Image (spheres, grey):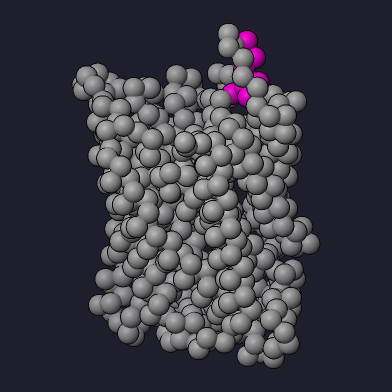
Amino acid sequence: MSQYRICPDSGLYFDKSAESLMKANAVAGAVALLVAGILALLIGLTRWPAVHLLGASDFYMILTAHGIDALIFWIIFFEIAILYFASSTLLKCRLATPRFGWLAFALMFIGAVTTNIAIFQGGSSVMMTSYAPMQAAPSFYLGLILFAVGALIGCFIFLGTLVIAKEEKTYEGSIPLVTFGALTACIIAVFTIASGAIILIPTFLWSIGIIGHIDALMYRVIWWGMGHSSQQINVAAHVSVWYAVAAIAFGAKPMSEKVSRGAFLLYILFLQLACAHHILVDPGVSSSWKIFNTSYAMYLAVLASMIHGLTVPGSIEVAQRKKGLTNGLFEWLRKAPWGNPVFSGVFLSIIIFGFIGGITGVVMGTEQINIIIHNTIYVPGHFHATVAVGTTLTFMALTYFLIPVLFRREMILPWLAKWQPYLFGGGMTMLILFMMGAGTLGVSRRHWDMGFAGSALKFEYPGVAETMMALVGIGSVLAVLGGGIYLLVTVGSLLFGKKLEASAGLFQSFGVPLAASCYTSDRPEPVRGPAAELEEHGSAGFEAPGTFALAMVLLVSFVVYYFINWKYLASVWPLG
């Protein structure tokens, strides 16, 4: 028999089986983040020319493990937890087939461990992309396949929970917007995992000698259906969290729920097309296909992100103005709870993801401009803006809410947690900007030594490139320090934080609701709280002039930067 509890402060509803699975997946994700963060520090200190910590073989091994642990294991573990939260908790419903949930978790955990062991045993330093004809150990591919199967089972459990909620009528009307966003992430995840299966299963068979040859171009095209689409899962998931935090922290409603749902639909239809920008210089794929995928069609996905980037802060502004913060364009923003890491983490994520990740993504997705920066260190600069800040910082912010609500523990070191989003976001921004600057000057994306020591043919980058790479190293140290503080506060709270009892009130340091600890076998009646807005529908009128002003700044920044790159293309590729 299912057991339930409901938080008297936040109004959130928990099925006990779903709660346990959320905890397990979130903790496993944190372990993957810890590993990825340690490896990131080693990579940053190696790319810093004056330090140059690792040798070549160790560097490529570490780079492989970092990419997979950070971009796949950490994020997808956490996203599975979000899927369970967005279905069972928000729909006030029991989780479908919890035993299969534990099977999914076991497959994912075993797969993650197996792949990491394969990497650190040597012989599998093929980077996250693992392009054929480079070949890793069979256990490298097997671990990824097991992880993908587990994640796919988790997606089906999410879909099954939606069916149960519909049949048991635990909600009225359409599913909440946050759950709709999670459904978007789930649909994209199924496409992503299918792409991975199509290419990784034959590659595994190739690694054990059953298949004699893997076509390199075919591998790249299909692999990026998994590799880049995994980031599209992240986008849909972290945008859903943005809406959730806006509702929880401010009681904010979407400015237009129909428009927001339409934007999520655009993600499903067009977001995966961005995969094409990784093969814009590959032969064998027509220019017409490249231009259509990375220009005309992909712009509809960009439109969707711009809608979310307008409506999330816009909804916060409307809610703040209703509370009387109406002076000038930005009083609502100045007097927002910047000392609360739940809010500050999310808002910093919105700004950095939009202004840096979004703008550079469009530039990289334009076939002509892409050639300037393709396979330079500009590329990881871009995806650190989308993954490391857009997704990871958002998930970090959500964790500060879930520690007291889901895990029922009081936060330790709240003063340190307040500064963590700024340290992590600031270090990442420094790393990102100087990566992109060095990439614009041509610094290689993956080369172990930008000085090419010992090479028969010498090449020297402009002197400022070395300075920029030193600043990348400093930024990586700051970002890893910020990530370490996140793990210290969250894991420390789980281990040493005071256990919270029923009706604990509010955690005054952050103003974050706390959870109740009582369970009942009867379905509890909803309790109104800050999270109640997650279940509601409707729209707020456009009353957000400050957000509109910020959107105009973003638009002008994009136009200026876009045409600067065309001018730069003309200067490096003169005609006539």
Apparent side of residue 42 relative to residue 309 in the rendered image (left or right): right
Residue drawn at the location 53% of the way across and 25% of the way down? 61
Q: Nearer the viewer, residue 398 or 273?
A: 273
* 285 and 417: which is toward the camera: 285
Q: Give the vertical position of 162 relative to 454 (above or below).
A: below
Name the quarter where the N terminus is drawn.
bottom left
Q: Residue at x 38, y 80 (%)?
A: 258
Q: Position of residue 133 (x, y in %)?
A: 34, 22
What residue is at 65 percent from the left and 46 percent from the top? 433
- Residue 388 to residue 306: above or below: above
Residue 327's spot in the image, x, y percent?
73, 87
Q: Residue at x 41, y 55 (%)?
A: 233
Side of 150 where 211 appears, left or right: left
x and y, in percent, of residue 432 in the image: 63, 46
The magenta stretch spans residue 560: no
Is 451 a magenta residue? Answer: yes
* Residue 13 in the image, given as x and y percentages of width and height: 47, 75
The answer to whether residue 227 shows anywhere in this view is no
User: Is 300 rendered above or below residue 224?
Assistant: below
Magenta segment = 448-454
The foreground one among 262 and 498 is 262
Is there any visible trace of residue 288 in the rendered image? Answer: yes
| Extreme-front residue of the structure | 576
